[in-house]
Each structure stands twice: as structure tokens, then as C-alpha cells.
Image (spheres, coloured by chain):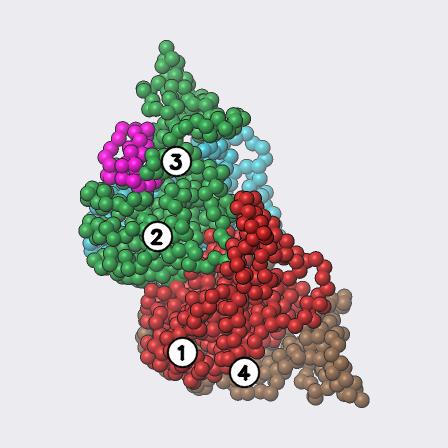
Chain colours: A cyan, B brown, C red, D green
Amino acid sequence: LAAEWVKNLNASGAPVVSIDLPSGLLADAPTPGDAVVRAAYTLSFQQPKIALLMPENSGYCGRVQVLDIGLHQAFANDTPSKYHWVGQAMAKGLYRPRLPFSHKGTYGHAALVVGSDGMMGAAVLAARGCLRSGAGKLTCYVPACGGAILPATVPEAMYQTVGQNSLAAVVLQGAYNSLGIGPGIGPVQGNWLMAVLRQHSGPLVLDADALNCLAAHPSLLSQLPPGTILTPHPKELERLFGPVSNGFLRVEQVLEQAQRLQIYIVLKGHHTFTATPTGQGFFNSTGNAGMATAGSGDVLTGCLTGLLAQGYPPEAACLLGVYLHGRAGDIAAEQLSQEALLAGDIVTGLGQAFKELASGRALGM
Amino acid sequence: LAAEWVKNLNASGAPVVSIDLPSGLLADAPTPGDAVVRAAYTLSFQQPKIALLMPENSGYCGRVQVLDIGLHQAFANDTPSKYHWVGQAMAKGLYRPRLPFSHKGTYGHAALVVGSDGMMGAAVLAARGCLRSGAGKLTCYVPACGGAILPATVPEAMYQTVGQNSLAAVVLQGAYNSLGIGPGIGPVQGNWLMAVLRQHSGPLVLDADALNCLAAHPSLLSQLPPGTILTPHPKELERLFGPVSNGFLRVEQVLEQAQRLQIYIVLKGHHTFTATPTGQGFFNSTGNAGMATAGSGDVLTGCLTGLLAQGYPPEAACLLGVYLHGRAGDIAAEQLSQEALLAGDIVTGLGQAFKELASGRALGM
Amino acid sequence: LAAEWVKNLNASGAPVVSIDLPSGLLADAPTPGDAVVRAAYTLSFQQPKIALLMPENSGYCGRVQVLDIGLHQAFANDTPSKYHWVGQAMAKGLYRPRLPFSHKGTYGHAALVVGSDGMMGAAVLAARGCLRSGAGKLTCYVPACGGAILPATVPEAMYQTVGQNSLAAVVLQGAYNSLGIGPGIGPVQGNWLMAVLRQHSGPLVLDADALNCLAAHPSLLSQLPPGTILTPHPKELERLFGPVSNGFLRVEQVLEQAQRLQIYIVLKGHHTFTATPTGQGFFNSTGNAGMATAGSGDVLTGCLTGLLAQGYPPEAACLLGVYLHGRAGDIAAEQLSQEALLAGDIVTGLGQAFKELASGRALGM
Amino acid sequence: LAAEWVKNLNASGAPVVSIDLPSGLLADAPTPGDAVVRAAYTLSFQQPKIALLMPENSGYCGRVQVLDIGLHQAFANDTPSKYHWVGQAMAKGLYRPRLPFSHKGTYGHAALVVGSDGMMGAAVLAARGCLRSGAGKLTCYVPACGGAILPATVPEAMYQTVGQNSLAAVVLQGAYNSLGIGPGIGPVQGNWLMAVLRQHSGPLVLDADALNCLAAHPSLLSQLPPGTILTPHPKELERLFGPVSNGFLRVEQVLEQAQRLQIYIVLKGHHTFTATPTGQGFFNSTGNAGMATAGSGDVLTGCLTGLLAQGYPPEAACLLGVYLHGRAGDIAAEQLSQEALLAGDIVTGLGQAFKELASGRALGM
């Protein structure tokens, strides 16, 4: 009877407003059937439910708004859950303001392996994201075609043009505080990446074709240094760990693999999901559909590498980096619209995003 | 007698304000003689008359203002006409806001064949126009000299440097959601364009020297995939379909050819005119004389290709793209003056233009 | 006695305010001696006196302010003088707003011969100045090293890379609406410039090393097409026409040569002075010391070439171009300070400068 | 007893506010032990104490605020001290506004020897810093790889591409008003630098690898032209003059060496310290931790070289340049946050920083 009622409601053509959850949707498990109300708006109470964060439910939920109904925060804090929500309060807690007497060494030396002929712009975007996230210094390893592009577009970055064969040796000499590999590099040789994984022990971010290389050489996964950060989008995740049938299983898969490999996995999407080696999962609260644009992920890799260089532990780097990246995108979309937003505008928004976290802190001489 | 009266009025030197139409002008047909009042201002009622949209009448009409005199909109709606006016209301109706759980694949992969030695800037402008119109990804096919320019100026775009001979094969492998050809490419070989037309079946925009190639090889016209968009200015139109003696005949010619070839023709001008395969004609309401500047058309080609990539049907892409392009130019001119406006400023204005269409819509989490 | 009194006053150390003119200064002739009051401020009445516009008197005048004391404008208008003051009123009178139905052909095709290895930035600045002054299209002739720079920095400009030997032939084929030669070109061969002068009959602007070439080959002066515009700074002027002992003689020299050669001479300085073939002289009212910076003149050459391309007669192009260039520099200095102002900021200010001239005009559809 | 009390206080976890100085700290000498209160905030009276400016005390002082308690300024002025505080008042006193009738020659021709393959961005930053500080003209000497980068990024700068071997001869021919050497040049041959030092007698700034070259060839130190400016950070200082055990000894060392070598030493840090040949020391009041970022020092070298070119004496150039550079960084951090601030943003802030110094001055025609 209820299914029939739902079917009629959905066929009515009237805009439906659901309260807390569209009827028929389970709060924290896959929907058993298709007898679910298709709401135009969902007004949910106090906390976003997991079901509202799953892509496959977006057709049921419409536009979601979470309303504060005055439940006591202590209750939420005392309720054990492996799922967490990264809002402004948590981001403020992770943020560490700069100390007056620091120098550029304080903020570390980051390195990025980025770009290839045809995708050198990814190098530009990742480099900008890294420096605007606060890294003290940055060296970019780029192919020969990049030598004229980096200094003209990101003069604050140093760069070295090296072929892929000699890359591992050169990069590892650098003793960098963090290393990001992937944006725009194109197909990567497995033995090169293996050499890096074997010799580099510091903070590491792998993205894009570095992930595809892992997927092509699964034996490399077990050689990832503990604490390594992977930043796949759903398709890259599938190549790495195989397909799953719904979003609930996907976050379970990410949590399992992060624990098994003792790494961080940042699954990119509308509510980017970070899984930690201890099996905790964090949904991000910021970002918008305008960030569904080429280069957005390159900027994120830069942000994470930049935060790691400054000494943020990987977990804080992931949660803060994803939050700031999303907030910067929201600021850009407010100024430029979602459609016109380019990945470079996310970089521009980082300043304002940091300022929001820093505000309210006393500053002296 | 009236002719004598008009002659004296025009010779008087006094600024003339015409009501509805300058006397002597027919509302929707060419003026039979030259006994027409030369107004400094024309205050027209409710709807712009076709005669006010014709370049050859601009000397008679002066500055035109359309005043709402409260006629019932239903009357206009019920009056059948093949001519339509694309104002903000129609543009808002065509605009589709982004969905929260979308990703960059949702917004398609566009491709542009653009640029040549001496006109590589056209590639930059078209690429920016395409990405700022919301395409999820963009690959540009440019000559060798462009390999250092694209990533330095439009880092969000991917690019491939290929010679014209191997271009068709390479482009067609890409399976793009839309393809734009023309800005800055210089003279094109007919057999290359023929190869593209034969094998590419998706949304297609042809501009500039791609149009001149069609004009030089008229047999190619019949091979245009249905729904192809051509974006000629009046001279390119004349090369394609021959001369006509006035603006009324020109829009008739455009309507006829669009129907015959089952394509869209966007005739660029003060009130850019779009003709559809079903014989409907749309005058655009936005834009200004500051957009009469080099590269303005390259940006438009980018916009249309970008909208097509996102899944807008060709008709919506034409009407919305032309409207947004013009509105972006108006926003730029308000800030910069008409004289100082460059084509790149139109790209910058696209964000504000999209925001106007998106405003008033509820946004959630 | 008066000389003694002046000497004591100047030695007093007190800041002196002079009324109308510092005592001892003649209004329109060189100062006969050095018994002149050194004012910190000069408050002059109604009109700037010629003496206040002479560089050699700046030490006497200090900061000059011209106060309106209510003299009837008709008196000034009726007083014949070969000297004129280009203020906002005159600039507004010269400015021609764009017509709605115009297209990029309406605003002409300009050409610039600019840049050399080591001074390619001058090409960038001149090109930007030209396009931001409203030219419909622009082609730049640059050396081989410029082929990668122009499209990356001024995508709206077309360009051609040619050696100096074949330049004349190539440029003259173009049938441009205006031609500007000089910014950053480095030493020029006399026979090349002669070839251009012999074959080019349209509007022409010569600057920088093109002027030095004329100075090295004085016989070329008589071959300048009537109406040609030269834009020397005082040292370039001296190389062209020999030294003079004061500013009064310098403007006389400029007026004489402009009449003799039937050309326009724009003598750049604090109050840039334009002399016409009919022997009239125009002091410009806009600009500031922040524009005493590298590349400022390159931008001016671009502006003049851009205005000529749009069909402004040479006299209007000179007066309006110099006025707009100075006003743009004033706008830039208000935002950025005089010290930090770069030539590129003058280009940026052109939009606001044009807007001031266009304001108050009715705009329609 | 007091030591015990301090230990307990520090262990209490309560935020401590110290008045004037944290207890246990000496105002102008190294702290004898570690029995010092660790304040979260220090509210100091009237003048910053030397101890508050030492990096090793930052853990004790926390955020420092200097409060005006109304002591008579005459007392401070009459108290002899070799240490000085460069605040806005002193900077305003050093600043010289531009004169209306000046031209670009008035503001000098600066030269920079900057950049290398891998660090060409340093050339871009130094060049921008130099020009935005008001130099009339600038020529940059860069390696071959820089020839395409300078004109595309700093069109106002001229440039010459020369190998290091022929550099000395070429640079010294130029007869520049100031010369800056170091940003991004990479390892320098001692004999090349020696050649420059022997033949160049004008104002000179040495930074980065030029300093490291001096450290590697200490005999060159005695050949520095009197008035030369060195701009080391603490590590470069240590390489030049050996290690010291605390900040008090470091400023003593800098003062001694500046006197001994008759040069200016600008020791970069939170409160950049300038020592003069006459043994005076100046602490700078501006700047923030966001400037602890790659390229910040390159911009400073540009600023100093630019001020020297305009005729500022070396002492004024150092004090004003460091003040403006820091203030520009403060302005940038207010807009962008400290984390997102890049060195290029300091250049952008220079305009506003100059405007603050120039404000309140009467300007005329």
C-alpha cells in the first residue's frame, strides 16, 4: 500500500518537501527497493544522515538542508560512530596559525612530480594549490616542455626538468618534507613508481596516473609507506579496488582498504570522504558542483602536499585540505557562478578560506 | 508632400524623437524609398519591430528604447510568428542549474580545433570561453607553436599538437561530447574537413576559416551532420550563400538555408540572429558595439562548444550561448567602456552573466 | 633691490606661496635672470600660463594649482592664441561614441612594428595600448623571438614573425588603416624605413628607434607622408632637430618643424605638447610623474595607432590619445601610487578614462 | 624560589599575560637561564625591548603588543642608543615624493643579475619588485632560458641573455644607477663576482648565491665597494661570518661586520635588522609570518635595487625598502591570509604601501 502511495505521489508532479529523510530511504543503509519518495527538497534535522551523502540517493533527496533543532551537542559527541562530519568547527580545531618568528624553512620544502606534454597545465594548478596552501618552498619536477611554463606562471616555484627514467634518483635526493605525484603526468612506468615508494619515507600524496599505475601494478599497494595519501575519484577507486554496487559499500570498501594498507584514502565527490588507517571516515561539508571541472583535483593534490610540508600530520592535512579546497570553491562559485568556475579560481579562493579559519584569533606585533 | 516634409525635418538639424517607428519605415519589410525620418531616438512600444533590428535602418532609428505599454503578454504569445526575441526570461527558461552530486564527466568533454602560427591567441580565447561556459573537460588541438602557449594561459585545458594532415584521425578518436572548429585555424584543406564531417556525428560548431572552407567547397554543405551550428558574420554568410540586398532578405536567406541543410545558423551582428532547422528565427537582446573587436567570435565559438558538451541541445546552446556572450559583453562594457573592451573581458563577464540566470533558485547542501 | 629681496626670500627657508606666477617669472617668455621667487606652491588664475608648463621653471613654481576666478569663458575663446589647453571639455568634444550596428571592421585594422630580442615587452605594451584604445583588429610584426610571447600575453592580437629585410614588403601588403612603428624595435636600417615611407600613404605613427633612424638619416624627414605623427621625448627631439636652450624655444621649434614637414609632433613630457601642421600647439592637462616609467611611451604609441585605425583624424587622435593616456595614468596612480605604477597599469586605466568621456550620453538598445 | 614559581606557572596550562616583559627575561641581554615565564601575550610599554625582537625569546613572549603609555617622545629622542625602530614616522621621513616635471631618467636605470634554469621565477619576482618600487628603467641579465619568460611576465623590463662568462663585461658597460645580483642565479664563480666588484663602483645589492659566493671566497669581502648592501637570512649570515649562540650576539656581529667592511647588512627575519657602516642598527616594524615564503627575499632585492636607482642613499634605501616590503606583505596578508600569501602578492601590495607614505601631501597640477 505504501509503495503504491509513494508511486502516486511521485507521479503527481507536485514539488515534494521531505522532512528529515524522504520516505522509503533508510538513514544508513542502501535502500531496499525503489518505493522512495522523490523529494524536491529535504529538510533534515541536526545532522546529515549517511543516506543523504550517497550519490545514488541524490534523485530522491533533491536539495538538502540540515536544520539545527537544538539537540544537545554532547549527545552527538558521546554517540560512538566511525563516521564524522568535517564542518567549520572541526576545521578551526585542526588549523594552526603561523608563529611570528618563523621563517620559510618552518613551513617546509614540498616537491611535486607533475605535468606532461599535453597536460602541463595540471602542473601549474597543483603548484599554485601547494604554494597558496602555505608551503615554505616548492620544487616541481616537470618534463622538458615545462621548463618555460612554470616560471612564467608560478614564479614562486622552483622546477627541474628531468626525464622519467632519472626522476626517482633526482627526486629522492631532495629530502623534501612532502612529495606529491600525479597531476597531469600521464602513463607512469611501474618500476619508476616502485623506486620512489621503496626509498621515500616522508609524507606522500598519490593522484591521477600515479593511482592508475598502482591499479596496473597491484603489488605496489603493499609497498606504500604508512600514512601515504591516495586521492582517487570513484572511477580511479574502482580501478584500484574493484567495483561495488552502491555508495554505502563504497565507503565501507574505502574504510577497509585504508585500514588494511595503513594509508589515507580521500575519495573525491560531492561530499569527499576521507578514510584513515584507524578505520574512521570523514565526510566533508564544503564544495559545490561548480568544482566538477578539469583541474579541480590537481589543485587538491597541491593543497594536501602543501599542508604536509608544513608539518600537518596526514590526517589533519586530508581533513583540512579537503575542507579548505571545498570552501575555496564555494567562495569562487559565489563570485563567478558554478558554471564559469575554473580550477584556477579555487586556488584564488584559498586566501579567503584560510582567513575564515584564522579569524577571531588575536594577533600581535 | 510627406516626402518633402520628411526631407525638411531631416535637414532641420533638430534632434528627432520617433514614436514606435521613424515615419517612412515599414515595421517588417524593407523601406521602399528614402523618405524616412532620421531619428536621434526611437521610443518603440512593447516589442522591438523587425525593422529596428536591421543594420541598414540604424541611420533612421538612432538609439532605440523599447517601452512596456502594458499590452497583455498572452496576446504576443498567441500571435504566431517565426521571429522570436531572446530576452532574460527565455534565457532563464533554457538554463539548467547544476546538480549537487554531479562530477566533471557530467559536464562532458569538449574538443576545439583552434589556432595557427600568427593566430594562436584565438585558441586561448576559444578555450577560455569554452571552459568558462561550464564544459567539464576540454582538449585543444593546436599546431606545434601552441604547445607552450595553452598551458601557460589556460592551465585547465588539455592540448595536443598535431599537424593538419593527421588531425582528423586524432580528433575523431577522442569521442568528444562536442567539437568546435575554426577560431584562428587559417586556411583549411577541404578534404580534411570532409573527413571530419563524414566521421563525426556528435554536436559540431564551425566558425571562421572552417566556414570559408565550406564556402570554397560548397559540396561539403550537404554533408554537414544534422544539427551542426555555423556561426558566420555577414561577410562569411555571403561567401557561403551569396549576396542579398538588405537585412530582411538576409534573415530570410538564413532561415531558408538552416531549413534546407537542417542545421543551425548563428548570424553574428548587433542583434545576433539564430535560425533553426524548423524555420524559426531568434533575435538576441544582449550585446553592444564594444564587442565589435577581434576575438569576440572566438569566445562565442568556445561558449557554444562548451554548452553543447554539457548536453544542451543545439538550439538551447545557440540561444543561451549567444545571450550569455552578449550579456557578458554588456557587463564588461559597464566596467571598462565599449572602446577598451577586449574579447578576453567577455570571458571574464561570463561568471556574472551565469549568476544572473541562476539567481532566485534555492540552493541546498 | 627686488633681486635682493627675492634672494632673501628664497634664503628664508619659509614655504612660499605665489599668487598667479612666482615674482620674477614672465608669463610667456624665458625668464631673463635668476631673480625669481622659488615658490612651494603657485596658485594661478583661470588658465595655466605658458611659463608654468616649462620644465625649467618647475623649481620656481613648486606645486601648481589653477583656480577658477570666474572670468568669462568667451573672453578666452575670443582671444586668438596658437596655444591651447586640452582639458576634459575638449576631450569630450573629440570623442565619438560607438554606433550600435557597427562591427569590428568599422573600427579598423591597425598594424604595429614592434619589439626585438631584449625589448619584446614593448611589443606587448604597445599592442595592449592599441587594442584597449578601441582598434577593431591588430596585427603585430615582431621578430622570431616574439612568436611565443604575443599570443600568450595579448591573445586578441594577431602577429607575424618576419625579419627586418622582408618587413616593408609584408607590412605594406596589409593595407592597414593605421601603422605604428617603433616601440622596442632597436636600431633600424634607414633603407627599410625609407621603403615604408615611400609606399605607405595611410595614417602613420613613428616612435623610439624609428625616430632615431630619422635623426640618423635626416633626408627621410622630407619623405614623411603628410599627417604622420612623431612622438619624441625631449632627447629624441634634440637628435631630430638639434638642441635649444629653453622650453619656450623648444615648443617654438616643434611648432615650426610640424608646419614645415606638415606632420604632427607629440613632444612627451609633464604637459605633453602636440604641434599640428597648421601651427597650433596643444598642452595636455592629464598625467603625472608616476608615468615617468619604462614603457609608458610604448603604450602611447599603441593608443595613437588604435585611435587612427578607428578613423579619428591625426589631430584628434593625438589630442584624445594623449589626454586618455594621461588620464589613465592618473587613475592608475590614484589606485597604486606614482612609484608603483607600471606602464601596464596605464593600459588598465584606459577603460575608466574612456568611461569618463562617454558618461552622460544616452544609450539605447 | 622565583624559578620554582615560574616553573609552576608555566606548568599550570593557564594562558599567561606578561606586562612589559615576561618575568625572567632581560630587556637587552641574553636570558641567563630558563627560569622565564612563558607568556601567551606580552603587553609592553611605549617601546619594543630588544629582548622582544630576538627569535630565541619568541617562545617566552607569545604575541607582543606595544602600548603607548604617554611617555614624552623627547626622552626617547634624547636617550642615545645604537638601536632604532623603523616605524611609519621614520619611513615617512625617508620617503621623497616625485616631482611633477621629472622623466624616466630621473628615476634611474637599474640592473639585475637574476635567474637560472630552475629558478627563473626569482628573476620575475625581483624584476617586478624593482619596477614597482619606482625605478625608471630596468635591464635584467638572465640566462638563455629566460629570454622567453621576462617579456611575457614583466613587459616593462628590458633583458639580455648572456652566459656567466661574459656577464661582467656586459653588465659593467651598462653604467647603471644601481645593480642587484643574486636572486635565483645558482652557484656563482668567484672570479666573475670579483670582476664585478673591482669594476663597479655604484650602488650594489648582493643576495642569495652572490652571498654564498662571498662566503666561499672570504677574500672578496674586503673588496666590496663601500656602501654595498648585503641581504642575508640567518643561515647565509652564518656562512659569511660564522656561528653565534644567540640573537643578541647575532645583531652585535652584524653591527661589527657592517662597520668593519663599511657596508650595509640587512639581516632578514621577523624584525629585519639593518646595520650601517657607522654602527647603527635598525629593527623593522612591518611584516608578518606569511612572508616566510619562497621568493619573498627576491622581491626585497628588487625593491632595494629599485630605490637605489632612484637616488635614495643606501641607508635610506635599506630602511625604506625593508619597511615598504614588510608593509606590502601586511597588506597582502590582510587580504589573502598569511598562509595563502605568495611573494608575488608582496609586489602587488607595494602600491598601497607607497600610498600610505605619500598620503597627506599636497598635490598640484
Which label is found at residue D282?
3
Q: How far apart, in angstroms, are the residues tagged by discs 1 and 3?
A: 57 Å
- Whether residue D287 appears in this view of the structure is yes
**Identity of the amino acid at label 4?**
Gln
**Identity of the amino acid at label 2?**
Ser
For numbered disc 2, what is the local secondary structure?
strand
Q: How far apart, in angstroms, are the residues tagged by discs 3 and 2?
A: 23 Å
The residue identified by callout 1 is: C218
Question: Which chain does the numbered disc 3 sit on?
Answer: D
For numbered disc 4, what is the local secondary structure?
helix
- Side (left or right) of D24 relative to C290: left
**Residue D158 painted magenta:** no
The residue identified by callout 4 is: B257
Residue density around tag 3, few if under 14, some if 14–19, many if 20 or more, within 10 Å: many
- Side (left or right) of B304 relative to C148: right
**Identity of the amino acid at label 3?**
Phe
The residue identified by callout 2 is: D178
